[in-house]
Amino acid sequence: MRMRRVWQSISLGLLVAVFLVSGVAGVTEQGRAMVKALLFIPQILPSVPVRPQEWLVTAPTHQEVRFPVGGAEAVADLYLPADGGRHPAVVLFLGVVPAGRDDPRVVDLARGLARSSMAVMIPWSNVMITSRRLDPEAVDLLVGAFQYMEKNPAVDPRRIGMGGFCVGASFATLAAEDPRIRERVAYVNSFGGWYDARDLLVAIASRTRSYGEEAQPWMPREDTREVFAVHLIEGLPNLSEREALSRVFLKGGPAEEVSPALLSEQGRTVYRLLSGVTVEEARSLLNSLPAGFRSELERMSPSTGIGGLKAPVLIMHDREDAAVAAEESRRLAEALEGRGRVHYTEFSLFQHVDPTRPLAPPEMARESWKLLMHMYNIMRLGA
C-alpha cells in the first residue's frame, strides 16, 4: 500500500512535469523528447498504477508482417503510431524469449514506444524460440527487418535504430555492425547483452563474474545455464552423447547416467564445462573445443566487429544481473569509449530486464530518474 501511494505521487509528478515541459515541447526537440520519455516510463513499470500516455495518445495499430530473408520468409510484429506521416523507427529483437508474442510485457513495450511516435518492428527467430539455441543467422533476420523498415511508407528511413534485450541486445549490436546497414543505423540500444560470448561462457561455466583484475562469485540463472547447455550439447557430432548429456543437464536426470570416461574428447570437454570448473579451466576447455564451434562464438560476439559499429550506442544493464553479468556491458562501453557517442547506465531497478526489483522509495525515485534520462536520450536520437 505504501509503494502504491509512492507511485501515485510519482505519477502525479510526471503529469505535472508533462504539462510544464509541454510549454517548450512545440518549440524544441529536447522538449518533445522529454515529454515522450515522461509519458513512456509508466507504460513499462508494472508497479505504476496510472498510465497517462494512454489517456493522451491514441492506441497504435498492430499487424503481423512477413519479409524476405535469404530466400526464406520471416515473421515480425509491426506496431505503428495512429497518426499519419513518416516516423522514426526501431527494430527490436528479443532473442531467446521464454514468453510468447502476446506477453503483456512485450505488448506494453511496443505500444508504449509506438505511442511515442515510433514505428516498432519485432522480428522473431524460429530457431531461438523453438529450440532455445543461439542462432548466428539471426543477424540476417535483423538486417532484413531493417531493410524492410527502410521501405515502409510509415517510416523515415533516416531514423531507424536497433534495440534488443539480453540475447537480442547482442544480436542487435551485431546487426548494427553489419556492412549492409551499419552506415544507416541511427542508434543502438543494448539492454543486458554480452560483449563477448566466449567470456560469457567462461563466466557461466566457472560461476564467476570478472572485470579487469577483479573477480567474484556469480550464480547464473537457470534459463541462462539452459541456453548455454543447449548450445554446447547441440554442437556435439555424436547423437548418443547429445542425448545422454541432454538427459543429465537439461532434463534433470541422475549424473550417473553419463560416464565421462566413455565420452569422446569433445564430449568430456562439454561434460566438464557443464559440471562447473575454475576460470582457468573454463578458458582452457573452451580453447580445446573444435575450431568451428569457437568460430561460431566469435560470430555471435559484438567484440569481433566492434570497429565496424558506426551508430551512437546506448547501453543498459542490471547491476546484479544473473542472466548476463553486467561486466559484459562494461566491457562494451569501455571498447567504445575512445570513439565517443556512447551512453551507459547501470540500474538496480531491474531483475535482468524486468523492472520488478523491490526498492525503498528514495532509491526507486533515483532509479526512475536514471531510466527517464536514458529514455530521453533514446527519444532524442530517434528524433
Image (cartoon, helix red, strand yellow):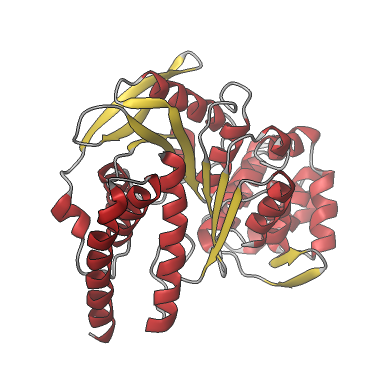
**For the view shown, which residue lies furthest in the top direction?**
71
Residue 22 in view of the camera? yes
User: Seen in the image, is 154 located left or right of residue 249?
Assistant: left
Which corner quadrant of the image does residue 346 belong to?
bottom right
Residue closest to the eye, 268 or 273: 273
- Compared with 6, 154 (above or below) is above
User: Seen in the image, is 193 located left or right of residue 8?
Assistant: right
User: Seen in the image, is 287 located left or right of residue 243?
Assistant: right
Residue 95 in view of the camera? no
Give coordinates of residue 200: x percent, y percent. Answer: 68, 54
Give coordinates of residue 137: x percent, y percent. Answer: 57, 29
- Residue at screen point 45% across, 74% down: 366
Give coordinates of residue 360: x percent, y percent. Answer: 40, 84
- Residue at screen point 67% across, 46% down: 340
User: Seen in the image, is 315 located left or right of residue 195?
Assistant: left
- Residue at screen point 28% across, 42% down: 114
Give coordinates of residue 116: x percent, y percent. Answer: 29, 45
